Amino acid sequence: MKTVFVGMSGGVDSSVTAAILKEQGYLVVGVYMKNWSQDLPGFACPWKEDYQDAKRVAVQLGIDFKMFDFEKEYRQKVVDYMIDEYKVGRTPNPDIMCNQEVKFKLFFDTAIEQGADYIATGHYCRTKDGHLFTGLDTNKDQSYFLYRVTSKALKQTIFPLGELKKPEVRKIAIDRHLVTAVKKESMGICFVGKVGIKEFLSEFVDAVPGSIIDQNDKIIGQHEGAIFYTIGQRRGLNIGGGFPYYVTGKDMLKNEVYVTTHIDDERLWHEELKLTDLHWINEPAISNNTYQVRIRYRAPLINCHFSNTKLNLLKLNDPVKALSPGQSAVIYNGQEVLGGGIVI
């Protein structure tokens, strides 16, 4: 009998993951990863509730249950990284870094050391022979967040939800009377819960108000701190007037945010991407071959090709709007995720 350690977050997806694997005959061990426990003003960290929910499901299923405390490493690898990126004006994705450094590295290594043959998570994606593929449910497909996972880890990872759609997962949980069957999905930052990025950053960064400057180099307002604004942002600018304003850029040294009222402003649109920190799950892409790229979660796939052998200059068949440095550009070949890089 093969042993699989299941990352159980206290949500319905990971609960059903554990249930399915037990029914398939695996020796299942549930693991709650304690990554963050700090409360923020007005927002209590939900880790205790999530831990208890995960433990209740483990009891229901009759499986062993552990807690891995990764809080120190998570703070260094994910939280500090995210804060540092925002400080220099980029827009990082902490979920991607969490998967790279914690779930499919730290959790994976610890589980294997403790006797696991495999690990499993509730991600909506598929894997085969160390390759990563999109989930069957295109609305829930989470392969975008996993492009920096290694082939080695994928060879010993199981994604039971990859062939299922969300309503089916809910039904499985309800039919088995799991305590998390009707639990709502958490929103906001992956490790804090309901708190938004602005509220979170405010606890760690001293934001200084500065000027908002339009396309005519005219100061038209004051921002609350350039760190809080992202390219393409339309809401939350608190600028009066008839036409909506869009953020086109920011200068962190000058503490200035630049906006435009022109939706077709060339600063909002890009037909090529420059990438850094490239990661390929298996073989790298081939220059001038046609692939597809996704620049944010649930964004449509766009046909593209790399125009140089360094694979750091990506040409798009269709222009994309509101591209922010720090975002991930994930490269697909049909349903397979090849890898990707960080936009600069």
Image (cartoon, helix red, strand yellow):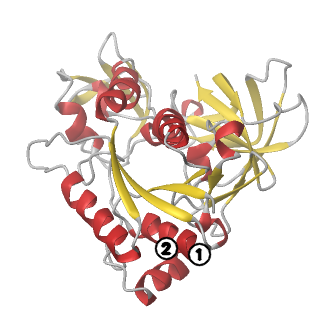
Task: Choose between 17 and 201: the one closer to the eye.
Answer: 17
Callout 2: helix, strand or loop? helix
Can you identify the residue that label 1 sits on?
A: 165
- Residue at coordinates 44% horizontally, 81% vertically from top-left? 173
Callout 1: helix, strand or loop? loop
Mark 1 Cα-neighbour bin, 10 Å: few <14, some 14–19, many ≥20: some
Q: Quadrant of residue 318 in the image? A: top right
Query: Does the residue at mark 1 contact the one at mark 2 (Cβ under 8 Å)?
Result: no
Residue 156 seen in render: yes
Question: 265 above or below 16?
Answer: above
Question: Percent from the top left, x then y, of residue 9?
Answer: 37, 57
Residue 19, label in figure: 2
Please state which amino acid type lies under the numbered disc 1.
Answer: Lys
Q: Position of 253 compared to 304: left or right? A: left
The quarter in which the N terminus is drawn is bottom right
- Residue at coordinates 17% horizontally, 21% vertically from top-left? 206
* Furthest residue toward front: 1
Please state which amino acid type lies under the numbered disc 2.
Answer: Ala
Q: Does label 1 or label 2 sit earlier along the sequence?
A: 2
Q: Nearer the viewer, mark 1 or mark 2?
A: 2
* Furthest residue toward left: 41
Task: Choose between 206 and 19: the one closer to the eye.
Answer: 19
- Residue at coordinates 45% horizontally, 89% vertically from top-left? 175
The quarter in which the C terminus is drawn is top right
Q: Total of numbered circles in the picture?
A: 2
Q: Quadrant of residue 86 in the image? A: top left
Residue 184 seen in render: no
- Residue at coordinates 75% horizontally, 23% vertically from top-left? 313
